[in-house]
Amino acid sequence: MEVTISCKFRLHTTKEQHSLIMQTAKAYRSAFNFVSTDHLGNKSSNVRVIHNQYYQTIRSQFQLPSQLACNVERDVARNYLSKWDYCKENHVAFETAPQQKSLTTPYTLNRTFSIKPDKLRVSLTTLNGRQGDIPISGWNKHYEYIRTGKLGDPKLVYNHRRKFFFVFIPVTMNVPELKPQEVVGIDTGQKHIAAIASTTGQKYLVDVKENTKQRKTHYHEVRGQLMKKGTRSAKRRLSYIADREKRFVSDVLHSLSGRIILTHTALFGLEDLTDIRENTNTRRKDKEARRQVEQWPFREFQFDMEYKSALYHGIKVVYVDPAYTSKTCPVCGHRDKANRPNNGEQFDCQNCHFKEHADIVGAINIAIRCLVHAQNINSWALVSGPHAPKVEQALPLQGVGY
């Protein structure tokens, strides 16, 4: 099974190299914004149309090398295509051109960018010629990946806060495919970050530590205070707090997904969270309820699960429709709002009187739907399908703290 991951490395440049790379990144951003804005009247996402109209302008006005000029055209075309898809899906007019704010420069492997994996050195094209023998540093595992995998076209990204450049290199590797030993359904929620149910009979809830919840609340309160203040220094501090919270949340979800993947060699069933924000029934005036719904980026957690399951086990995850998973009995199939009194945590089937935690029931139903998908059978087969795992008490996830 082929798996592609992005390896991140820091560039250790001299002052002169840093200045030249910075000039190139700014020129690329300016060229992108110019073409994107000027092309708004046409709105075509065809690369050839953009090339014929803007290639010479990019070369002469922004002094970009040939390959980087072509990358600008492809970047604009890709962004216009994404914008068209968004406008069609949300029924809105295409009125504003996509703009690039960050200093992000896509390079082309073996043309504008080359790397020596054994020596951990890179060279890249700038406005003033080639800059070579630039040392890089990163995670030890990524060193192994770039030496053994197939490399793709990298991206150079400037970190404004830390004042240096990172290069992100996609690496494609062949991973042995393991046979799933179980099917595991994962239900994400507001109070419990995840509920897990397996066809082997395991089922448990995963909670974040109390100090993690307190830290999230602290970030929320600090953001509110800074937004009320509204000064320039407050806005800078707000940006810093936002980045810090994002890193903290990513670390929590990264640790959680890693522990689950190492605990289960399984086919994982996850919820399809498309349009989850729009479909969530939350009163507009209830700010705290909205914050609880939106405080954990579950799509990021699912992305971590997806790539780690493929990387470590060679098993793809399955996304299923999460509708009514916490209100449908996994034993008899009876679906009723009354199965979950007052929309609380307790599930009590009104037909067969099966009782369980509502989030666990959701995870069981996700596992069943995942199993049905994997077996490629029709929904009517659930009439004689598998029952819920018969475990009397939820098992804690030992050794996990988030």
Image (cartoon, rainbow, N blue to C red):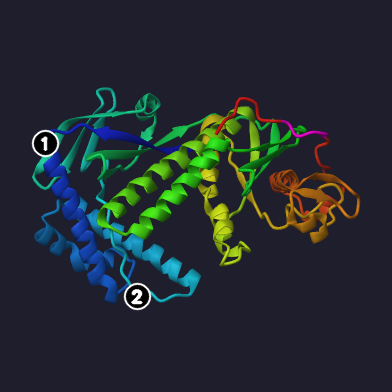
Residue 364 at x, y = what percent?
A: 74, 44
- Residue 179 percent coordinates (x, y): 65, 31
Residue 378 sits in quarter: bottom right
What's the distance in space between the residues labelled 1 and 2, CA to CA?
Answer: 41 Å
Task: Residue type at mark 1: give it.
Answer: Lys
How many other residues sit within 10 Å of disc 2, few (<14), some (14-19) or many (≥20)? few
Q: Image point 30% across, 33% down: which residue? A: 9
**How dense is the environment of label 1, judged by Cα within 10 Å: few (below 14), some, or many (20 and up)?**
few
Determine which residue is flagged by label 2.
95
Q: How many marks?
A: 2
Q: Is residue 177 visible?
A: no
**Residue displayed at 61% across by 63% down:** 282
- Magenta region includes residue 392: yes
Work out whether residue 345 can be spotted: yes
Q: Residue at x 12, y 39 (%)?
A: 130
Residue type marked 2: Glu
Left or right of 237 in this view: 189: right
| Mark 1, secondary structure of its residue | helix
N-terminal label among 1 and 2 = 1
SS under mark 2: loop
Camera-near label (1 vs 2) is 1
Looking at the image, is 389 positioned above or below residue 327? above
- Specify the segment rendered in magenta: 391-395
Is 251 positioned to the left or the right of 352 in the image? left
Residue 139 position, x and y percent, is 36, 27
Q: Which mark is residue 15?
A: 1
Of the 4 image quadrants, the one containing the C terminus is top right
Dominant SS of magenta comes to loop
Name the one closer to the observer, 159 or 248.
248
Q: In the image, is residue 268 part of the stretch drawn in magenta?
A: no
